[in-house]
Image (cartoon, grey):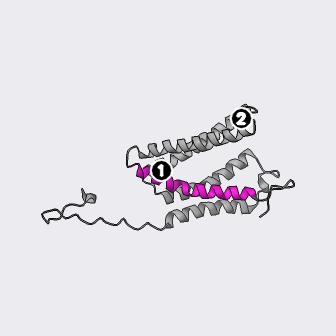
């Protein structure tokens, strides 16, 4: 893979894209784990989302602020349009993250929910990108491979959702024996 040079960007972008794939690939399962381990079936998802917000603040507010301050541009050069579109993007991302939690709360399993999201999001991205930035040769210049890719993303998400391996059933806990020798009801059956 090439490195950054004055004549071209190289492939550094790919490393960052793959970093994002890894992070977003584990996002749903970690978020579900956070929701479940809150041990609050009614409000656990909201508690988990609160900590997602704290993480966003630490990562998406403080880190860029430090970088911008180090470059001397923290509080200058903002445009109304740039701020507006960035805010809309952040709201869309936050609503999407909240939607993930709501899907889990409605008994969607992380593997199915995230498969649908990660297969569907590129399709939505392609359609919106085409609407905002039409191709130079018009819509008729779009190659059939593009549409095949959209179809494959939809089929792939469907296949992963329908044929995902099921987890092993939880191991049953041994029944406790009372002091008098009689079996007691296990905590699972109470």
Say left or right for 18 vs 157: right
At a point 55% along the width and 62% down the height, the residue shown is: 158
At a point 14% along the width and 66% down the height, the residue shown is: 181
CB atoms at circles 2 and 1 under 8 Å apart? no
Callout 2: 10 Å neighbours few (<14), some, many (20+)?
A: some
At a point 75% along the width and 46% down the height, the residue shown is: 133
At a point 71% along the width and 46% down the height, the residue shown is: 131
Q: Which label sits in the foreground, 2 or 1?
A: 2
Residue 52 image position (x, y, % from top left): 52, 45
Q: Secondary structure at mark 2?
A: loop
Look at the image and tell me in which quarter the C terminus lies. Answer: bottom left
Circle 1 sits on which residue? 103
Say left or right for 10 vs 52: right
Say if residue 106 shows up in the picture. Answer: no
Q: Which residues are magenta?
A: 12-39
Extreme residue toward the front, this view: 70
Say left or right for 186 vs 121: left
Can residue 27 be found in the magenta stretch? yes
Q: Secondary structure at mark 1?
A: helix
User: Dominant secondary structure of the magenta stretch?
Assistant: helix
Label placed on residue 3: none
Displayed quadrant of residue 26: bottom right
Residue 137 image position (x, y, % from top left): 82, 52
Residue 144 image position (x, y, % from top left): 73, 62
Of 137 and 52, nearer the camera is 52
The answer to whether 94 is drawn above or below residue 178 in the figure is above
Can residue 114 be found in the magenta stretch? no
Displayed quadrant of residue 154: bottom right
CA gap, disc 2 to disc 1? 37 Å
Circle 2 sits on which residue? 74
Label 2 or label 1, whichever comes before in sequence order: 2
């Amino acid at each position: 893979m090439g490195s950054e040079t004055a004549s071209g960007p190289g492939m550094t972008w790919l490393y960052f894209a793959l970093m994002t794939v890894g992070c977003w690939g584990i996002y749903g399962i970690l978020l579900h784990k956070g929701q479940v381990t809150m041990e609050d079936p009614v409000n656990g998802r909201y508690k988990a989302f609160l900590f997602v917000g704290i993480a966003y603040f630490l990562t998406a507010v403080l880190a860029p602020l430090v970088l911008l301050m180090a470059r001397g541009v923290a509080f200058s050069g903002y445009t109304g349009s740039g701020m507006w579109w960035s805010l809309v993007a952040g709201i869309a991302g936050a609503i999407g993250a909240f939607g993930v939690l709501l899907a889990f709360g409605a008994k969607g399993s992380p593997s199915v929910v995230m498969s649908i999201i990660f297969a569907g999001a590129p399709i939505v991205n392609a359609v919106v990108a085409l609407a905002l930035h039409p191709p130079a040769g018009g819509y008729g210049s779009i190659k059939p491979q593009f549409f095949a890719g959209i179809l494959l993303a939809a089929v792939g998400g469907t296949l992963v959702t329908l044929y995902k391996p099921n987890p092993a059933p939880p191991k049953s806990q041994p029944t406790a024996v009372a002091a008098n020798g009689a079996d007691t009801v296990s905590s699972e059956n109470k």
